[in-house]
């Protein structure tokens, strides 16, 4: 059986603009890069009973999503009306403390069952750019505690 590559562009990201009890999931449109990373803190748990072999144990994990997008407006509007998902992330990224925390979910749209939900603190990286380029929109979503596997909304 031949194997085929999976595309990074199959990932979708949504923000909850409602509440946890009454969620309103809004897509963050215009993504051009999506990178999930998990960092692990390891501690040596070797002992005298291991016949000289060392051992490590995970003591903490952190997760984050590094995203890039092109700043978009709603289609058909003569004036700039920002994409609601992008604007929600930008607004949270300009606040400090718990104001920068939002609930997200991210999942694959290609039939793979991977899907996660969690709370993140938004680090907005700013806009702008050269005269000839589309305005970039980049941000990092830093996980606040554990991410939870969910049923894939695209299924």
Image (cartoon, rainbow, N blue to C red):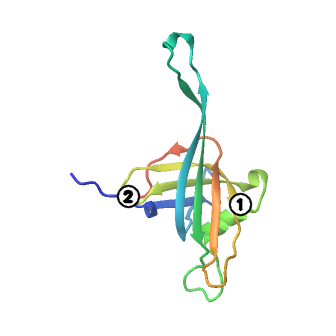
In the rendered image of this protein, does residue 68 appear above or below residue 130? Answer: above
Residue 49 visible? The answer is yes
Please name the residue that numbered disc 1 is placed on. 92
Which residue is label 2 attached to? Answer: 6
User: Which element is circle 2 on?
Assistant: loop
> Which residue is at 64% across, 57% downward?
140
Front-lying residue, 49 or 136:
49
Looking at the rendered image, the quarter that the C terminus falls into is: bottom left
Q: At 63% from the left edge and 41% from the top edge, which residue is drawn? A: 145
Instruction: Tell me whether the residue at label 2 lies in contact with that at label 1, contact meaning CB atoms closer than 8 angstroms.
Output: no
In the image, farthest residue toward the bottom? 78
Q: What element carries label 1?
A: helix
Lateral position of residue 42 relative to residue 6, left or right: right
Where 2 sits versus 137, above or below?
Answer: above
Residue 27, by quadrant, is bottom right
Identify the residue at horizontal 62%, vertical 70% (top origin).
84
Sequence-first disc among 2 and 1: 2
Mark 1 crowdedness (10 Å alpha carbons): few <14, some 14-19, many ≥20? some
- Specify the farthest residue to the right: 96
Residue sitting nearer the eye, 32 or 74: 32
């Amino acid at each position: 059986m031949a194997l085929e590559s999976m595309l990074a562009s199959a990932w979708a990201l949504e923000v909850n603009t409602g509440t946890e009890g009454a969620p309103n999931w809004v897509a963050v449109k215009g993504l051009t890069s999506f990178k999930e990373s998990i960092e692990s803190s390891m501690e040596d748990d070797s002992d005298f009973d291991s016949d000289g072999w060392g051992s490590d144990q995970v003591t903490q994990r952190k997760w984050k999503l590094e995203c890039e997008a092109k700043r978009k407006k709603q289609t058909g509007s003569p004036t700039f009306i920002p994409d609601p998902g992008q604007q929600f992330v930008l607004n949270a990224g300009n606040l400090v403390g718990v104001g920068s925390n939002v609930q997200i979910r991210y999942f694959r749209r290609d039939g793979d069952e991977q899907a996660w939900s969690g709370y993140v603190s938004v680090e907005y990286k700013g806009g702008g750019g050269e005269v000839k380029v589309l305005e970039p929109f980049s941000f990092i979503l830093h996980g606040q505690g554990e991410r939870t596997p969910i049923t894939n909304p695209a299924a």
